[in-house]
Amino acid sequence: MTAAPPSNLPEPARFAVFDGDLDAEWAALYAGARALAVDTEAMGLIHGRDRLCLVQICDDADNVCCIRLARGQQRAPLLQALMENPAIEKVFHFARFDVAALAENLGMAVDPIFCTKIGSRLGRTYSPRHGLKDVVQELVGVELDKRAQSSDWGQVEDLSEAQLAYAAGDVRYLLPARDRLETMLRREERWELAQRCFRCLPVLADLDRQRFPLLFEHSSGGNR
């Protein structure tokens, strides 16, 4: 289904909403991308309790789509092929959550990964603000509207125009932010360190799913 989300931002080149999975045309369109920006919306932050409701994708030509997921859905084959394609970098903000959500709900092993939050923490050490809104505003010059962030994403068939606009906005500026972070990380000689961090993300996501989120934190009790 093709649509155009209302927003105070410029409209994307193309925008579509799908139920359950991409269609063949959009899957082929994205298959030729060097990188894809990806985000997810869920009913909450606890894997296994809070289901995944929406997956948003954008390529570097500003083609944006939202995939609405039904309750209990366990597979999205065309989306999975993209998420597991080793030739396409998947760019997230706080990838740890999204990678875990895609694995928990749809059985996807996302790879390779770039996380703009990790990139920001490694590169923008002059700032204490590493949320998506702050990163995009500084690096891309766009102010995101986050008012629909905490809303009921489970009503997938009746998502409001404000929700769709919010969802689209969250992926449209990840790729330019990623490129600016790469420049910064290379300049500061932290690019290889960032790459090593990104390769660890699937392990951290699996630990979150299995209820070991604090495994690497030091405890004052017991032996060191």
Image: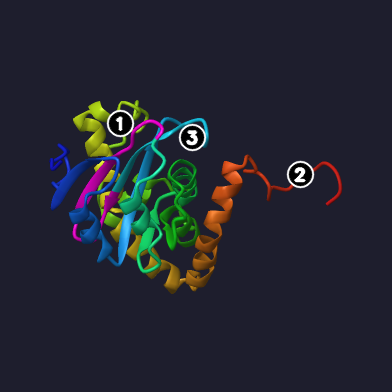
Most foreground residue, 156 or 11 = 156
Q: Is residue 138 visible?
A: no
At 42% across and 30% down in the image, what residue appears? 43
Categorize mark 3 by other alpha carbons within 10 Å: few (<14), some (14-19), many (20+). few
Q: Which residue is mark 2?
A: 219
Element under disc 1? loop
Q: Please tell me which of labels 2 and 1 falls first in the chain.
A: 1
At 37% across and 29% down in the image, what residue appears? 150
Magenta extent: 57-72
Looking at the image, residue 163 sits to the left or right of residue 181; the answer is: left
Label 1 sits on what residue type? Ala
Work out whether 32 lies above or below 218: below
Where on the picture, by quarter, is residue 174?
Answer: bottom left
Q: Please tell me which of labels 3 and 2 falls first in the chain.
A: 3
Label number found at residue 175: none
Pick the quarter of the image with the N terminus: top left
Q: State yes or no: residue 68 in magenta.
A: yes
Q: Which residue is mark 1?
A: 148
Q: Is residue 97 visible?
A: yes
Label 2 sits on what residue type? Ser
Label 3 sits on what residue type? Leu
Looking at the image, residue 14 sits to the left or right of residue 72; the answer is: left
Looking at the image, residue 141 sits to the left or right of residue 77; the answer is: left
